[in-house]
Amino acid sequence: MQKLLDPKILMAIKDLSLSAKMTIDGFMSGINKSTVKGMGLEFSQYRSYQPGDDLRSLDWKMFARSDRYYIRESEVETNIALRILIDASASMNHSDGNFTKIDYARYLGASLAYLANLQGDAVGLYVLKNAGIFSMAARQDYQHLARLFYQLEQINPEGRFTKPIHYKELFAGTQKRELLILVTDLYQADEEIIKLMDTLNTLRHEIVVFHVVARNELELDFKGYSTFEDLETGEMIQIDQEKARKDYKNKFAAYLAETRVNMLDRRISYRTICTDEPLEEALRDFLKQRSKLRI
C-alpha cells in the first residue's frame, strides 16, 4: 500500500479538504470498498436456496438451466452515522515545532470525514468548547462535507473542557447506534472527559478515543526551557529537565497504560496517536469500528 505522506507536510497545506483527499487517496490504494452481501443492484454471486429465503431473490433462469433453486446475491454498500467530537480546550494549543495538537486534530477529523463520506456515511461534527458545544448534525453530501471542513478550520481552542451542562447537544439525533470518535489530548482536571465517556456509553454507541500527544510531550524534549505553563489554568512550574526526564517518562508511560485500561474496561476503543505519525492506523481503526455498525 502506498505510504501516506508526512503529516506535517499535509498539515502545512492550507486547504484542509485537499490534505484530507491526499491522505485518503493514499490510504485507499489497495483497500477494497466495504460491502456486505444483501439485496442490491450489483450482482455478486449465487448460492443454494434455503427454506425461509425471500422467493423474489430466486433466479429462474438458473433454475431452467440446472433444475435447482439458486438465490441471486448482490452487494449493497454499508452506511452508518459518524459523529466526530473535537476537544477544543486550551491544552490543544500545545505545540511541537510549528504544529499544535489542534492542527493534528483538524487533519485527523478532516481525513476521517472524507473517508466516511467516501464510504457513503453521514458525518457530523461536534466541537467541545469552554462555552458550550458547536454541533453539526450528521449528513451525507459534499456540500455538508465542505461546511464541516470550514468549521474544522475555524476551531480556536481556549479555556477548559466543556462543562456537563452542555452535553445535551450530544444526545440529540437518531435512536440508531452510531460511531462516535473523540479526538482529544485527555487533559482533564477532575476526570471530566472520562465522565463524558461514561455518559455517552449509556447510549450504546460505538466509541473510539484518539488520544493526541506530541513527541516533545512524550520525550520531555523541550530544549532551552525550564519553566512550564499549564495552558488551561495558567499555573507555572520550574523543573530541572535532566533530573526530571527519566521520572517523567516513566510516569507518563504508566499514565498512558492506566488510561488504556480504563477505556478498555468501558469497552471504548482507544489509541494513542502522536502528532508526527501518519494516520494509517487511525483510519484502520475507523473502518474496524465501522464494520460493527453495518445497517
Image: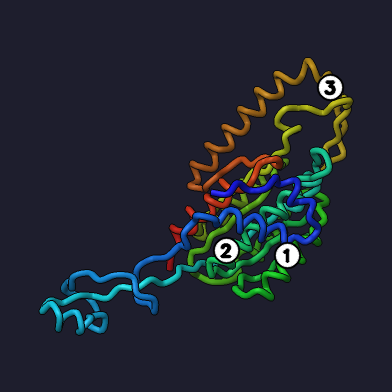
Q: Which mark is residue 149?
A: 1
In the image, taking residue 51 as reference, residue 12 lies left or right, namely right
Query: Which residue is located at x 20 percent, y 83 percent?
Result: 61
- Residue 264, how many percent across, how many down? 50, 42
Give the vertical position of 253 relative to 149 (above or below).
above
Q: How many marks?
A: 3
**Type of residue at label 3?**
Ile
Distance, label 2 to label 3, CA atoms, is 44 Å
Is residue 161 among what the camera can see?
no
Q: Residues within 10 Å of mark 3 (few under 14, many from 20)?
A: few
Residue under label 2, please give it. 116
Residue sitting nearer the eye, 36 or 259: 36
Nearest the eye: 118 or 168: 118
Instruction: Indicate the amino acid at tag 2.
Output: Ala
Q: Is mark 2 on a helix, strand or loop?
A: helix
Q: Residue 162 placed where, x, y %?
A: 73, 54
* Mark 2 surroundings: few (<14), some (14-19) or many (≥20) residues within 10 A: many
- The amino acid type found where label 1 is placed reads Phe
Q: Distance between the residues labelled 1 and 3?
A: 40 Å
Kindly report the distance in space between the C-alpha atoms of the residues bearing marks 1 and 2. 13 Å
